[in-house]
Image: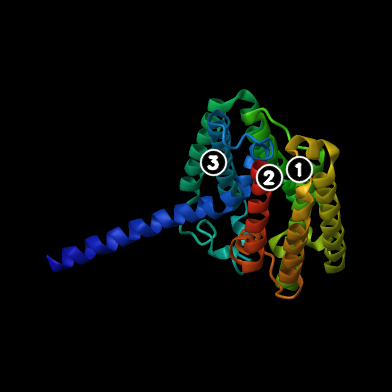
Amino acid sequence: MKKLGKVNGKGKKLNQTKWRDYVELIRPSHWMKNVFVFAPIIFSLKLLKVPELLSNTLAFTAFCAGSSAVYVFNDIHDRALDVNHPVKRKRPIASGRVKVGSAWILFGVLLSIAIMLSSLTSLNVVVVVGSYVTMNLLYSTYLKNMVIIDVMIIAVGFILRIMAGSVATKVYLSNWMLLTTFSISLFIGFAKRRYEIVSLGENASNHRSVLSMYSEKFTDEMITTTVATTIVFYSLYTIDPSVVAKFGTRNLVYTVPLVIYGLFRYMYIVYVKNEGGDPVEIVSKDWGIVSSVLAWFVAVLIFIYIK
């Protein structure tokens, strides 16, 4: 009886480990990126309107399922390359903890959920989420090997997140905000490429072939440029006459220092702490980044909703 109990206990532990592997595979921590779907409803003064909020939440959930499907596909496609990466080789598929066949089934389930939830919102949301998934499947199989284009695809992904929120709630953001989103996404993308070049050294191209076409100096230039354009675009957004008239306040300009601090803090992490491989880790765990993001969010809510 004791022996049977040990077997059952071991089997239960094995099942728990398996579930954790599947959860790790869909990367729920990366759903943080999908909060961009809520940007239109926040900046349209409709955050407290229940129908729009429910529609926006559906679009957000659909994007979470779609982005997780993309992560599963990417890990299936890159499993041979991930084995050579000091961190990615520990991922469920690369390490062999999740079989490829099981991963394909999970991919199909997640994609079906994304389409179903999108269709409950509107056909336009289906188109946007479908475009995001298609673009990233092309990225995983081909586009990630094209220098500069690979980072621009990542940035376009964030624009599509905003578009999903826009078509779900039928509200649209200022072009300055779209440019700000695109620019900050490029900054984060080039910071990640720099980290990969520095951390992997001569083996960088073995993990990602496009890294052979980048250099540390080039990524440094791109980081500096995109940080500058992000600050300019966001500053212009806060003083845009149409934005001031819409919110009835000029106070948004006082959030610019928070954005500048957040960007400079990220650069400090990249250049001084030699990190930057996982933006989600940085944004969610670095006290400086977390503090600036929360302070910015609270300030925006106060300035446009409370005044």
Q: Which residue is mark 1?
A: 249
**Disc 1 marks which amino acid?**
Thr
Residue 11 percent across, percent down from the top left:
28, 59
The answer to the question of whether label 2 and label 1 lie on touching residues, with beta carbons closer than 8 A, is yes
Determine the CA span between mark 2 and mark 3: 36 Å
Q: Secondary structure at mark 1?
A: loop
Please tell me in which quadrant of the rendered image residue 209 appears.
bottom right
Return the disc, 2 or 1, that comes first in the chain's sequence: 1
Residue in view at x 57 percent, y 36 percent: 48
* N-terminal-most mark, 2 or 3: 3
How far across and how far down the image is residue 299, in percent? 67, 52
Rendered image quadrant of residue 158: top right
**Foreground residue among 34 and 170:** 170
Instruction: Name the kind of residue labelled 3 in the image.
Output: Ala
Q: Amino acid at mark 2?
A: Lys
Kind of element beneath mark 2: loop
Drawn side of residue 151 relative to residue 99, left or right: right
Instruction: Give the labeled residue for mark 3.
Output: 65
The reply to whether residue 152 is in sight is no
Left-right relation of 82 to 157? left
What residue did someone put label 2 on? 307
Q: Is residue 250 left or right of 300 when viewed as pictured?
A: right
Q: Secondary structure at mark 3?
A: helix
Task: Depth check: give the residue in front, 38 or 66.
Answer: 38
